[in-house]
Amino acid sequence: MKNLLTDIAGVRVGHAEDAKVASGVTAIMFDQPAVAAIDVRGGGPGTREGSLLDLASMQERVDAIALSGGSAFGIEAGGGIQAWLAEQGRGLRVREAVIPLVPGAILFDLLNGGDKAWGRFAPYRDLGYAAAVSARTEFALGSVGAGFGASTATFKGGLGSASALMSSGITVAAIVAVNAVGSATVGDGPWFWAAPFEENSEFGGRGLPPAFTPDMLKMRIKGGPAASERENTTIGVVVTDAVLTKPQAKRLAMVAHTGFARALYPVHAPTDGDVLFAAATCAKPIEPVVGLTELGTIAANVVARAIARGVYSATALPFPGAQPAWKDRFG
């Protein structure tokens, strides 16, 4: 176990970034099409192929999932991943036509100090293609891919991942790009809200504070008095090797989304874009009631851990006045 999304067999992850723009893309690639669903909790989401994942849609499986910075411009990242898949002959076959299916979600990182004057076309389609090309079973965390330009209310955001092996032999893992309106830390740190679920000191082993004070529980939001939730979104994917139907994958996404609330304070704001995909590679059978409930419970823990790891692993952007990273103060 690498404590990464790629602990699920048949899943690869690739990143691509543009340091000048201070943004990037993460591609989650499935070696074989995976059953997928989506759960949206933010009030202002930005998604690609979201209707495809609706339970009313007859299509169950997808070839990849795109996570991107760039706000609405970043939706094009899925097209780049789609182009690479088409070159490999991967996708839904309709007679002679091959159509790769690549849902995605975006986060807002347009005000982080990077140069967003990219000309006529945004770079995200090319970044999506590069991320697909680079997809491997080993990948970096922190200020990489979709988390390159991410931020939170208190510290630099980033991309995190975590996994867990259940007693049944089923594996569940998550990858999250953390660009939250709220904070992943209790007060101004160093403790993470996700501390009760931490394993092997994966985000510093600081635990929780010995006592909570009113100041620690005071709401901290990005931008302070000038805050705008439109600048925020946390997006991610939870994947399992269990055999799930599309409705069961939807339920997994709903339950696993609880991990956002375990790791971020506040969360799911009115115009936030918080989105979580769930996917199943369908390698191992699962009991549909108690087994699925346990899977969702562990998945929520894994999502919370991934969020904390993303912030813990992040590094500050190299711009004047850039938001400090957690390790700048506590590392």
Image (cartoon, rainbow, N blue to C red):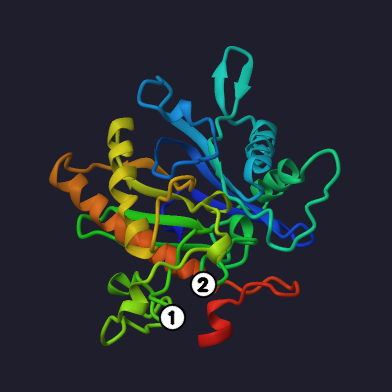
Give the class, few, some or many, for how many residues have Cα within 10 Å of label 2's Cα (few <14, many ≥20).
many
88 vs 301, nearest the viewer: 301
Whether residue 89 appears in this view of the structure is: yes
Q: Position of residue 170 (x, y in %)?
A: 28, 53
Residue at coordinates 45% horizontally, 63% vertically from top-left?
182
Q: How many marks on residues?
A: 2
Residue at coordinates 54% horizontally, 45% vertically from top-left?
29
- 3D distance between C-alphas at marks 1 and 2: 8 Å
Residue lying furthest left: 290
* Tag 1 near tag 2, CB within 8 Å: yes
Q: Position of residue 216 (x, y in %)?
A: 36, 77
Provide the secondary structure element on which disc 2 rests: loop
Q: Position of residue 190 (x, y in %)?
A: 43, 82
Where residue 189 is drawn, which disc sits there?
A: 1
Q: Amino acid at mark 1?
A: Gly
Residue linked to disc 2: 154
Q: Amino acid at mark 2?
A: Thr
Residue at coordinates 34% horizontally, 54% vertically from top-left?
172
